[in-house]
């Protein structure tokens, strides 16, 4: 199905009151629930569920078998690897269901962040701009911009450039060997010296 502005595979379902941006492609067996807002030129892979009222920015890529639950926001250029997991309730119980926005802990994935395959993001946290969450990691706290996070629970083992290059260890300043973007560390946090235009 296509309305001329975006594409939805015929096996997928799009509920009422959904906004889909120009150039977005939604592939097989997806469900986009009411109130969801998806930006332009996104790619939604096979078997993806986008929950009620989820906000997805522009140029986002969500790989196969991901559920983006209510309470999650993905900013522009975020990447969700295959079968990664979001949660939205801290202490779920079947016998005592917690449904509705008042129970959901919000999760924010900032611009350009990448979440690897099979990683889990425990709700209520922010993944910083251009952070890189390794495959299988379990994020249990906020993640700084550009942080390279691995393990269970996830811990920072280095820094990643905006372009995705893993930066060599350094103490003060460095230039990315792939794209040339310059960085410096201030009070243990990585900052870009250059403004990158997109």
Image (tube, rainbow, N blue to C red):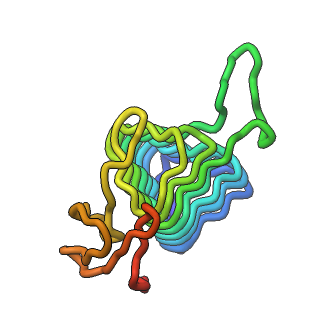
User: Would you place residue 95 above or below residue 176 in this image?
Assistant: above
- Report the residue that reaches farthest toward the top: 95
User: Would you place residue 58 above or below residue 84 in this image?
Assistant: below
Say if residue 32 shows up in the picture. no
Q: Quadrant of the C terminus?
A: bottom left
Looking at the rendered structure, the number of numbered marks drawn on it comes to 0
Tell me which residue sits at (52%, 70%) in the image.
Answer: 58
Tell me which residue sits at (41%, 67%) in the image.
Answer: 190
User: Would you place residue 182 above or below residue 60 in this image?
Assistant: below
- Report the residue that reaches farthest toward the left: 177
| Residue sitting nearer the eye, 105 or 53 | 105
User: Would you place residue 25 above or below residue 135 in this image?
Assistant: below
Q: Is residue 132 left or right of residue 19?
A: left
| Residue sitting nearer the eye, 15 or 54 | 54
Q: Position of residue 104 (x, y in %)?
A: 71, 40
Tell me which residue sits at (25%, 81%) in the image.
Answer: 180
Q: Position of residue 107 (x, y in %)?
A: 61, 49
Say if residue 184 shows up in the picture. yes
Tell me which residue sits at (76%, 32%) in the image.
Answer: 99
């Amino acid at each position: 199905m296509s309305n001329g502005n975006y594409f939805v595979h015929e096996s997928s379902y799009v509920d009422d009151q959904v906004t889909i941006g120009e150039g977005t492609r939604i592939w097989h067996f997806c469900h986009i629930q009411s109130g969801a807002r998806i930006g332009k030129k996104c790619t939604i892979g096979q078997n993806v569920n986008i929950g009620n009222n989820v906000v997805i920015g522009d140029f986002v890529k969500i790989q196969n078998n991901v559920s983006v639950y209510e309470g999650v926001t993905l900013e522009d250029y975020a990447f969700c690897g295959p079968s990664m997991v979001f949660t939205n309730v801290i202490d779920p119980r079947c016998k005592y269901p917690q449904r509705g926005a008042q129970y959901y802990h919000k999760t924010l994935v900032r611009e350009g962040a990448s979440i690897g395959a099979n990683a889990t993001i425990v709700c209520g946290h922010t993944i910083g701009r251009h952070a890189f969450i390794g495959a299988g990691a379990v994020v249990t706290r906020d993640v700084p911009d550009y942080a390279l996070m691995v393990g269970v629970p996830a811990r920072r083992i280095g820094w990643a450039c905006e372009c995705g290059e893993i930066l060599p260890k350094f103490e003060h300043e460095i230039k990315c060997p792939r794209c040339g973007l310059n960085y410096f560390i201030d009070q243990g946090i990585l900052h870009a010296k250059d403004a990158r235009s997109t």
